[in-house]
Amino acid sequence: MQSLDVVIIGAGPYGLAAAAHLRAVSGLQVRVFGEPMEFWKKHMPAGMFLRSSREASHIADPRGALTLDGYATASGRNHLSYPIPLDRFVDYGRWFQRQAIPDLDTRRIRQVESASGGFRITVEDGEVLNSRRVVVAAGIAPFAWRPPQFTGVPASRVSHSCDHNDLAGFSDKRVLVVGGGQSALESAALLHESGAQVEAIVRNPRVHWLRWRNRLIRIKLIGRLLYSPRDVGPAGISQLLARPDWFRKLPRAAQDRIAQRSIRPAGAAWLVERLKEVPLRTDCYVRSSVPVCGQLRVTLNDGTERIVDHLLLATGYRIDIAKYKFLSPELVRSIDQVEGYPRLKSGLECSVSGLHFLGATAAYTFGPLTRFVSGTYYCVQALTREIETVA
């Protein structure tokens, strides 16, 4: 049975960044499991663009060489357009993996459980490993939020946006999109461009567009003062969110207010033109949905009805680490949690010694930055410092 220092679960931006940093630490035995960029490749629609800026879309590496610019040079592309196309970002992540973790193990982890001196890890084919530490960077796919009112509606008629990597199959269909964030708005645009008859409904009184942000950033001095290069949060607050160690020292009520303000549903300004012919209804939500002759009769809160072929829920994600099926039930119960989030300390370590959580699962403790690719810099540096200190 192989004994390791660190096992990393997940090969998206956070898992790749963690692996690149920890493998630069002399003497550490590190193995990484997961399919590279799996969520981005399998759970986001073809034709999508990243909302974040180019500067905020680099995956952290210890030498600062595996950036989007490094990728562009290596792949013979002198210029990457903005916004960054999804397929380019996926290709960038896979290039990063080939440079930093060429021996990535793409098998899935079946179970992680506590054991003497650390953890016992079982791989999908039955191989068993021991590791002193486990880093969970397994992404948000298990946390897709489907409002309970849609329970029981056939999956062929109602799905979550993360269930699709290509929306072209809805061509000539009537589709109702639920949600007012980037995922909902861009899905509506892609559906329209694919030939679907699409309408989007937004619970909020208005759609928030990120227009002023782009204008202020163009004024370089003001932009640098008001917005961190990490590109998370509104003016001024952005600088605070880029420093999670400051954020976590605020009173809990202040943290919650700032976090809510910083990740409220909003769409990139470049979507406005693409949605000119798509009806966007605000102050609106689904009251009921009933299957009728292979379609859905949808009743809205204003009493109006729609007959649609499909209801697409772009309703976001709600963290609940118990939904990571590879964590044993006993291990999950031993983790100090708040509303499904692990309560973390320095080094992104939870109450179970040696167990670390990266990415969106760290947001309750360290703030919204950890929900975005730009958060890889803070998270993996803090993780590496902690592991080096006690190695």
Image: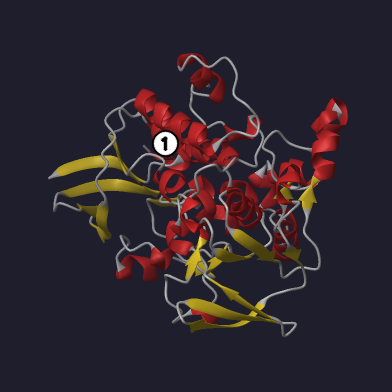
| Camera-side residue of 327 and 233 | 233
Q: Locate residue 322: give its quadrant.
A: bottom left
* Relative side of 255 to 183, left or right: right
Q: Can residue 225 be seen in this view?
A: no
Image height of 350 relative to 309, above or below: above
Measured as percent of width and height from the top left, residue 96 is found at 42, 28
Measured as percent of width and height from the top left, residue 51 is found at 65, 42
* Relative side of 151 to 278, left or right: left
Q: Locate residue 53: give its quadrant.
A: top right
Image height of 338 relative to 132, above or below: below
| Camera-side residue of 34 and 62 | 34
Quadrant of the drawing holding the C terminus: top left
Which residue carries the number 1 mark? 16
Secondary-structure class at tag 1: helix
At x 48%, y 27%, the residue is 61
Which kind of residue does numbered mark 1 sit on?
Leu
At x 26%, y 30%, the residue is 103
